[in-house]
Image (cartoon, rainbow, N blue to C red):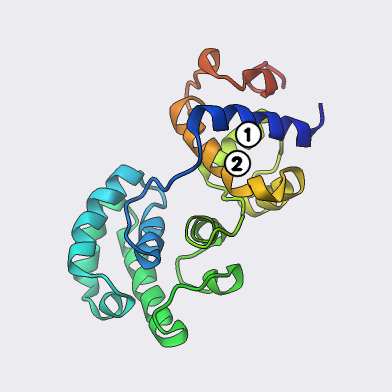
Amino acid sequence: MNKKTKAEKVILILKDIYGEPVPTLNYENEFELLIAVILSAQCTDKRVDIVTAELFKKYKTPKEFMEMDIKELEKIIHSTGFYKNKSKNIKKCAKMLVEKYDGIVPNNMDDLIKLPGVGRKTANVMLGHIFNIPGVVVDTHVKRLSNRIGLTKQQDPVKIEFELMKIIQKKDWFLYSNLLIYHGRAICTARNPKCDNCKIRVYCEYGRGIK
């Protein structure tokens, strides 16, 4: 079975299990989602939602984030980890949004990745959830599962992204990413994956013991 056919079958099975993707982070607008995704690096969505519930009560716009005291920002987001770096990036990101984009989150990859703290993964999350523009989001789950299934052997997220774009139909790029994220959290965990309960095991090299 070639990789394109395998990917199609995996998507069909996982879509039947998990349905259409919905954001797992709480937000009310595109700017809030952008901040939440930046905070989600090396942090659980549950923790991010707890932090942003407090953060977004006090600060809502790029201008307010640009002007807020960085020490207060560090204090609020401390529990998300890497808080000093995240605080600097969030402040710089807000400043660029205000000064270069009139406070509006850009709707294209080229401009999004110019924002401090925003890489291709974050940009693809924004494009998919907010602007309905397909892209492959390569987070730790997508990287791990794509390797285990046998769709790629790459380890670099950008190389994985572009390889998967050749294998998966464009209309399914964002869907594939989100389905693998759901499955990675529920079944195909980093340690002790539940292969016996995995509905896509028949298509998975790792699950079938293929080295």
User: Which residue is the site of mark 2?
Assistant: 176
Residue 66: x and y, percent? 30, 79
Q: Quadrant of residue 149?
A: top right
User: Do tag 1 and tag 2 residues touch (Cβ < 8 Å)?
Assistant: yes
In the rendered image, which quarter contains the C terminus? Answer: top right
Question: Which residue occupies the extreme top position in the image?
Answer: 196
Q: Amino acid at mark 2?
A: Tyr
The residue furthest right is 2
Q: Residue type at mark 1: give it.
A: Ile
- Number of callouts: 2
Please determine whether, in this image, residue 173 is positioned above or below residue 120.
above
Q: Residue at x 36, y 69 (%)?
A: 90
Q: Residue at x 75, y 43 (%)?
A: 167
Question: In the rendering, which numbered label is found on residue 182?
Answer: none
Q: Which of 166 and 156 lies nearest the eye of the viewer?
A: 166
Please give left or right for residue 25 compared with residue 200 in the image. Answer: left
Task: From the viewer's side, name the closer residue of 77 and 111.
Answer: 111
Q: Which mark is residue 11?
A: 1
The residue lying at 71 percent from left, 39 percent from top is 152
Q: How many neighbours does mark 1 have within 10 angstroms: few (below 14), some (14-19), or many (20 or more)?
A: many
Which residue is nearer to you in this view: 84 or 13? Answer: 13
Position in image of residue 124 (x %, y %): 55, 57
Tell me the CA gap for discs 1 and 2.
6 Å
Mark before the other along the chain sequence, 1 or 2: 1
Secondary structure under tag 1 reads helix
SS at circle 2: helix
- The image quadrant where one finds the N terminus is top right
Q: Percent x, y for residue 85?
A: 37, 64
Residue 141 visible? no
| Whole-percent x, y for residue 115 in the image | 48, 73
Q: In screen coordinates, is 12 left or right of 113? A: right
- Residue at 55% x, 19% y: name it: 198
